[in-house]
Amino acid sequence: MPVPPTSGRLQWTDVPTPLRARLEDALGSSVTDTVTPAGGFGHQLAAALTLESGRRVFVKAAPDDDPLTAANVHEADVLDALPPGAPVPNLLGIHRGADWTAVVIAHLDGPHPDFSPQSGDAEQTWALLDKLTSSPAPASYAAAVSTMPSTAASLHGWDELLADPSADLAPAARDRLPQLTELEAAWPALAHGDRIVHGDLRADNMVRDHHLGVTFVDWAHATTGPACVDAASLAPQLILAGHAPADVARLLRDHPATARNSDTTTAFLAALTGHWHRNARKPAPPGAPGLRAYQHRAAAAGLALLGYRLN
Ligand SMILES: Nc1ncnc2c1ncn2[C@@H]1O[C@H](COP(=O)(O)OP(=O)(O)OP(=O)(O)O)[C@@H](O)[C@H]1O
Ligand SMILES: [Mg+2]
């Protein structure tokens, strides 16, 4: 799948000198090179640092008055609380200085997974999701996410489009607006659960590490919820990567995380797709140039999947 373009991210040299010095001190070596990976929509520093010692680490950093700092600290708590064997990089530390906060994470070496039909990465990711959601989240994880409101639970969009249908709405959506609105309205009551939910699972929030295989990163939106959320979020991504919607619809029907929660899966897909359809039509936010085009494509993919579930 083509990964959305890297936005105007903060660079290592934007980090205040006292925090850079503190980080280099804690890592025991000075930074000799930085690489900002492609992917994602954020504006904070998210970079692989190469140290003089040859070691590499991954750092996310932002000013403390930027909401991304709270998200990064939440992500650090989550990384620390995920169960052993979860497909995640280790947290290495949190450092503060000059009213900025940096979270240091073990560096993963490799590209984003390739979700095209020719690759085995999608299959590997489905297997990881089965393992991650087959039993309740451990207490440490549930505690780490307990203060974080679920962003998935508040997804919606069809309600606004029903009230004010956009002229360019696809006929498949226009014809079903009342049904889609009803389905997404059912979602918030179904959004609770005791499973690990990454909450933002796309290829650009994964790295296919040369040693670890597909690994999930960017746990800033992690919560607990029903087992189906991440699998159902991944499904439209596979269509964007070239899979036939009918094949993905079959996968969703049969995957353990979604097969056991069929109505919840449909309600969530409706809410997620409504969110994309609504947001794709809003003005582009500053610093995220690829976002609206991506939402248009994701909206169409989600609608294609819903077509199979509603027939
Ligand atoms: N531990 C890691 N090692 C190597 N690369 C990583 C690591 N974690 C993330 N990345 C890469 O850095 C990119 C940005 O990281 P991440 O998604 O965590 O940042 P973000 O600012 O929260 O993202 P977003 O833009 O999605 O909000 C990812 O798309 C991935 O390519
Ligand atoms: Mg990301």
Image (tube, rainbow, N blue to C red):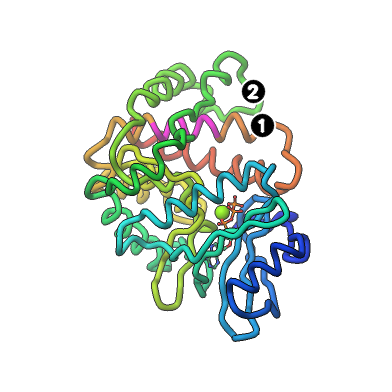
Instruction: Residue at 77%, 60% (x, y): give it.
Output: 14
Question: Where does residue 121 sit, x and y in percent of width and height?
Answer: 40, 65
Does residue 173 sit above or below 298 in this rendering?
A: above
Residue at which label 2 appears: 166
Instruction: Name the quarter showing ligand 1.
Output: bottom right
Secondary structure character of the magenta stretch overall: helix
Question: Marks 2 and 1: CB-CB under 8 Å?
Answer: yes
211 and 300: which one is in front? Answer: 211
Residue range in magenta is: 268-275
**Would you place residue 9 above or below residue 270 in this image?**
below
Residue 269 in the magenta stretch? The answer is yes
> In screen coordinates, is 142 left or right of 10?
left
Image point (33%, 36%), residue name: 265
Q: In which quarter of the view is residue 227 placed?
A: top left
Is residue 79 located in the magenta-colored stretch of the structure?
no
Dot label at residue 154: none
Q: Which residue is mark 1?
A: 281
- Decide if ligand 1 comes within 8 Å of the CB at mark 1: no
Residue 84: give x, y in percent of width and height.
Answer: 30, 62
- Which of the two residues, 288 or 310, is positioned nearer the viewer here? 288
Question: Between tags 2 and 1, which lies in front?
Answer: 1
The answer to whether residue 271 is left or right of residue 126 is right
In terms of sequence position, does the residue under pointer 2 or pointer 1 come before the other?
Answer: 2
Q: Nearer the viewer, residue 288 or 196?
A: 196
